[in-house]
Image (cartoon, grey):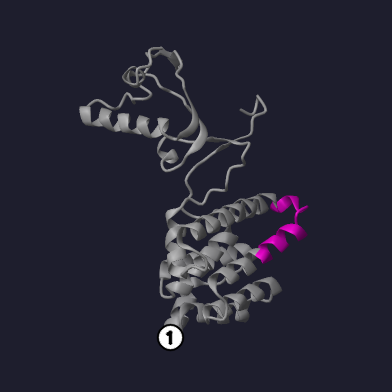
Amino acid sequence: MADRGIASQVVVRRDEFQSPAFRWLHSALRLAVHNTDERVFRVFCSAFNEMFTGTLSASAILAESEGRRVDLLTAWHRAVHDVMNLPEALSLADATARHHRGGVDHASFAAGVIGVFDQWLEEDRDDAGRAAVFSAIEDDRGAWRALSAEVGRAIGVPSDPERFLQELDLRSKEPPVGSSTVSLMTIHGAKGSEFDHVYVCGLAEGIVPSYRSKSAAELEEERRSCFVAVTRCQQSLTLSYARRYSGWRKAPSRFLGEMGLQP
């Protein structure tokens, strides 16, 4: 694709956001709903430490929360003010505390935090040493905005925070693909998606169906996967196979014959 000047993107399902910034935002919203979840809290603290090269100890804050009988976010907010002096970190901690106390709804909180991330990107865009970090934030920002809009269409706006998170967790977190970019994905990765034009490659014996599929049940599963692939299109479908794979000659897939297509 690159040699021919065609924009393409390998689409891989992401169950979590890639950048510390959006992992932190996601876990902050989760904790606001379930503020005793220790696993999420550890992710929350780890992501915040990555963002600000901090040394906050999740275990110490958990112990503090239990000892003082306060919830995790309240104990974390105190810890940030005790050990950090970065204005950006303190500002996010205060915004999280306001959201946790119910002063700000989840959508406004997320929008405000993303606005901070946008400001970081604008101010430090020329910092070559952090290019990979900023690229991950930009990818996640695109994914968050697309997912928020998708969830909003599915459940309505304003939405219940717990329902919003449930819907968000069900969806992959990869960034949206541009309208002129070719999406490259596995058949299983394409489930539930639709495209104007679909190209299914590898319709050869030993590829689709896989050489590992020996039993009738396994072949039937391969047949269903092939059905998924060919039904993703809305306007055109192109099926292809090669005569050789890794130097080995291959016959056309039996599924082509079953579709009434004789290569």
**Viewport quadrant of the N terminus:** top right
Q: Residue at x 42, y 83 (%)?
A: 66
Q: Mark 1 points at which residue?
A: 67
Numbered marks: total: 1
Label 1 CA crowd tier, 10 Å (few <14, some 14–19, many 20+)? few
| Quarter location, residue 169 | bottom left
**Viewport quadrant of the C terminus:** top left
Relative to 109, say whether 258 is above or below: above
Q: Where residue 193 sits: x, y (%)?
A: 46, 42
| Quarter location, residue 105 | bottom right
Relative to 37, say whether 230 is above or below: above
Pick the residue in front: 40 or 62: 40
Q: Is residue 6 visible in the rendered structure shown here?
A: yes
Q: Where residue 166 sits: x, y (%)?
A: 42, 62
**Tag 1 secondary structure:** helix
Q: Which residue is drawn at 49% across and 72% down?
A: 58
Q: In this view, does 66 lie to the left or right of 105?
A: left
Q: Where residue 237 sits: x, y (%)?
A: 47, 26
Magenta-highlighted residues: 115-130
Q: Residue at x 65, y 25 (%)?
A: 3
Q: Residue at x 47, y 78 (%)?
A: 72
Q: Where residue 260 sits: x, y (%)?
A: 35, 17
- Give the main secondary structure of the magenta stretch: helix
Pick the residue in front: 101 or 41: 101
Residue type at tag 1: Gly
Q: Does the magenta stretch include residue 166?
A: no
Pick the residue in front: 30 or 47: 30
Relative to 124, say whether 34 is above or below: below
Q: Is residue 41 visible in the rendered structure shown here?
A: no
